[in-house]
Image (tube, coloured by chain):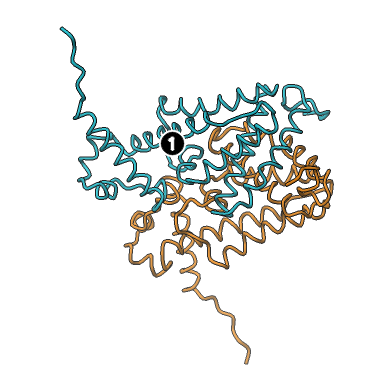
Chain colours: A cyan, B orange
Amino acid sequence: MLETPIRDRRAERREATRAEILEAAWELARAEGLAALSLRDLARKVGMKAPSLYSYFDSKNAIYDAMYAQGSRQYLERDAGLGLTGEPLNDLKAAMHFFVGFCTEDPVRYQLLFQRTIPGFEPSAESFALSVEGLEAVQKRLAGMGLTDPRALDLLTAVGTGLTDQQISNDPGGDRWARLIDDAMEMFYNHVSNRKGGGAGNDGHAR
Amino acid sequence: MLETPIRDRRAERREATRAEILEAAWELARAEGLAALSLRDLARKVGMKAPSLYSYFDSKNAIYDAMYAQGSRQYLERDAGLGLTGEPLNDLKAAMHFFVGFCTEDPVRYQLLFQRTIPGFEPSAESFALSVEGLEAVQKRLAGMGLTDPRALDLLTAVGTGLTDQQISNDPGGDRWARLIDDAMEMFYNHVSNRKGGGAGNDGHAR
């Protein structure tokens, strides 16, 4: 006898409710601050009593974790769609425009994915793996340019995070730091491509 | 008749209580998150009922503002004590070691002074002036090196904030990004000192 594939309407409803709770959590985090998310306010926003939330998420950290995974997946999807040319400096610029754009379009998502804003919150191994995947994509891209020293990767993430952070913190909605992206990538690429492996230790300075 | 200078014991007590409230607010912010500061918890921590707090601070934002001013003064005092040599690259490195050290030693103070972590909070004009003073000191230092283009300043603050941010977020308590400071300052200085005014627009690229 053949199995009849039937829709699991109960699971579908459950998934839809979880998605609705997450959407409400993002809205509250944007309004009140990421670390200030209140389960009582969240329950009220989705028309539940607070204990009912626990049938969808075990804890507040489980909600943050699901938000983290969701944001990381959005990042990976968009990153995979980057049309790169193979010309290193152009690709660095394009990838950095994407990164800063992704982060500044939703500062709370940026805080959750790239900063430690919530005391005591660490993503689960499963969610963190998505973030590692994003970093590995950058690493692979650098390696394709001959930049294999891990310090080149760290320097690049510092420059990217710094441009993002200053843009969000000191010129929200503007482009004062975003318009430095091309210049910053020229600075980075000239610096690291002049050195073996793109790392430090080969510039004549004793360390 | 000479005025007799007498101590205003009442004002001294008031100032001491305000300082105690601020200290408790920092501790709570470190434990719960900066945006999650609760006036009820704060009152409990200093042994008051919540309404009594209002005789010391008008609002939660007034507490954040006093914390902001306190942190900014700590920054200015420490920055003024930097022994610089007049040798540009050495001074850039020394100043950046100070900046990253100051920020990473207290990530919550860093969040308050340099990021937008609390929705709706803006420092008062008086407190913000302290922050502007700090930035102007950096600007003056760069000008002394012949780097007067405002984009050089913005690039430097991006690199500094990025190193700090990555250190705090991805290697708390370690030195993975802190040990890139000298390298990053060499990258920055080589880049900007090769250009008139230390800014962009002079590198042969059309913009």
Q: Is residue A157 above or below residue A199?
A: below
Residue B86: x and y in percent read 84, 49
Quadrant for the N terminus of chain B, please: bottom right
Image quadrant assignment for residue A93: top right
Left-right relation of B169 to B86: left
Residue A163: x and y in percent read 62, 44
Residue B107: x and y in percent read 53, 45
Q: Residue at x 18, y 15 (%)?
A: A4
The amino acid beneath tag 1 is Gly
Q: Residue at x 77, y 38 (%)?
A: B186
- Badge 1 crowding class, 10 Å Cα cut-off, few under 14, some 14 to 19, many 20 or more, is some
Q: Which residue, given by chain and number where applicable, does mark 1 sit on?
A: A71
Chain letter of disc 1?
Answer: A
Q: Is residue A183 above or below residue B126?
A: above
Q: Residue at x 46, y 74 (%)?
A: B10
Residue B139: x and y in percent read 73, 56
Report the residue that reaches farthest toward the top.
Answer: A1
Secondary structure under the numbered disc 1 in the rendered image: helix
Report the residue that reaches farthest toward the bottom.
Answer: B1
